Image (cartoon, coloured by chain):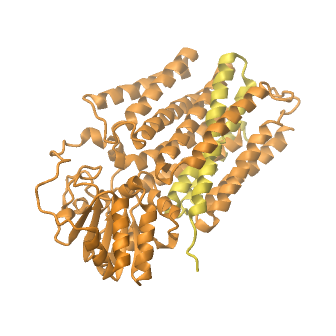
Chain colours: A yellow, B orange
Amino acid sequence: MMSNGMALLAIFTLSIFVGFEVVSKVSSTLHTPLMSGANAIHGVILVGAIVVADHSSNNVELWLALVAIVLATINMVGGFVVTDRMLEMFKAKKK
Amino acid sequence: MNRNLYDLIGLAAAVCFILALKGLSHPKTARRGNLIGAFGATVATLLVFFFTGNKDDKNYHALPLHHLPLIIGAVALGLLVGVPAARKVQMTQMPQLVALFNGVGGGAAALVAIVEYLKLGSEATSAEVIATVFTVIVGSVSFSGSCITFAKLQELMTTRPVVFPGGRFLIAANLAGVFAAGAWVVNSGGNTSLAVLGGLSLLFGVLFVLPVGGADVPIVISLLNAFTGLTVAASGYVLQTTLLIVAGTLVGASGTILTRLMAEAMGRSLFKTLFGAFTAKPQAATGEAEARPVKSGSPEDVAILLNYARRVVIVPGFGLAVAQAQHTVRELADVLASKGIDVAYGIHAVAGRMPGHMNVLLAEANVPYEQLAEMDEVNPTFSQTDVALVIGANDVVNPAAKNSPGCPIYGMPILEVADAANVVFLKRSMRPGFAGIENELLYDPKTTLLFGDAKDTLTKVVSALKNL
């Protein structure tokens, strides 16, 4: 069995290929929503921020983690909302 | 909830993110894709509140989470800031907002890595320390770089490249300092070294974006997006969370692809775009109009020209966004279409301030996406086009990119509007575009210039057309 670190490295490597494969098919019309949607996806660092806030053992750590939670929430929720707003506007020609 | 179930649901969330990006391959499926992504992110976030770890795990803890009220308060604060910002922003201001969201994400990732490092202390393995150093450097650069990008786009500061004497030595010294501080953290560790690393990285982000000019901002935004993605992936390694690794890597890939596409669309290497301002020879005094004759026309003249055209291609640029003229453009296109005139939009990949900026603006004005043509598609059709209507674009149609070696945009593929029978430029003034290069096309006999705010002049053209 792989060590934990190696397994994570394998996931990382495979994700690179999945990412390139999926994103290279995105139509150029949608580059702005792609960027803001991808932006929203990395907002999932919120998960990490909550975990470290829970782990924090003193006030400095706690407050740094709380700031991270605020920033990550802005990133994630704002990102998805604004992407949805943009995509709503992309409509096909009415027949 | 035990670790296995947690990981399983985390995996499902990662699949949601892949589906979200896959949905973007077509406008029809894009919105659903984004909602799937949002669903995955919501589930992943809620899950953390119910996760205890395995009983025999060193990370096992009882629920509820420590500091639960503070955590919920912080999430609520984030919602209060993020949602209204995302709902109210105008489409013309999208690049700023995306830059800002990207920056706060990078900042959050850096903070997460710092807190985890403080907690682990001497227990951290060297791989974890290296991942932490990477996250702090790249996350901080992304944060401060995005803040400067935001300031440039919001015009809180000049959009021109900021270059000062000895700038490149300062940047080189700063970069060396970042690496030295990184080595310091890896070798001896400690809070001081980490603080120095963070500070130097923040400074580097500022110095790195300052010399980039307004027109090159699309590349910087894409690049910083890729940076933040990789930062999140590295924090995923430190926190041993598969979801963060997958999500971060997907974003890293998308940012990298966009950066490469933008660099190709500008016909320059990434390196030259980022550091070009340091090596460029000073341009001859630009910004002042040459005293050469140009043909300027009235909105009525342009209306007559358009009225007798069979095919019109509209080329939008950043000026369209500044004037908020996207709705008026659509109105014009509708009037032309009602007269049986063939209308298309020619979109240059780097028109505007972020990849795909023009597409979003025109979509806002309900222009069907089928009418938006990319450069390769539209270029062969200019020879059958009667009027090319250039609205607030300059560099992307400047023949200097083909004809004058040595000018900053030489080699950039352009929209060949000069092939059209007539060219109409809507401009605020004779000032050259962001690259600061004269456009020979403005003096061409087949060119008509229409000065003024794009929205006002277009409105006049539309009403003149209706009366014809």
What's the residue at 25%, 50% (across, down)?
B408
Q: Is residue B395 above or below residue B158?
A: below
Please state the horizontal and vertical placement of residue B415, each as a whole percent of the image.
Answer: 32, 66
Residue B127 occupies quadrant: top right
Residue B190 occupies quadrant: top right
Task: State whether residue B179 appears in this view.
Answer: no
Please state the horizontal and vertical placement of residue B385, each as a whole percent of the image.
Answer: 32, 78
Q: Residue furthest front?
A: B467
> With A18 as the anchor, is B154 left or right in this view?
left
Q: Is residue B136 above or below residue A83?
A: above
What's the residue at 72%, 50% (across, down)?
B40
The mark tally for this picture is 0
> With B192 as the anchor, is B260 left or right in this view?
left
Please state the horizontal and vertical placement of residue B235, each as a whole percent of the image.
Answer: 63, 35
Q: Is residue B294 above or below residue B438?
A: below
Image quadrant in which the C terminus of chain B is located: bottom left
Q: Nearer the viewer, residue B49 or B179?
A: B49
Please state the horizontal and vertical placement of residue A74, each as a whole percent of the image.
Answer: 62, 39
Q: Is residue A31 above or below residue B55?
A: below
Task: State whether residue B221 appears in this view.
Answer: yes
Q: Nearer the viewer, residue B165 or A32?
A: A32
> With B316 as the anchor, is A67 left or right in this view?
right
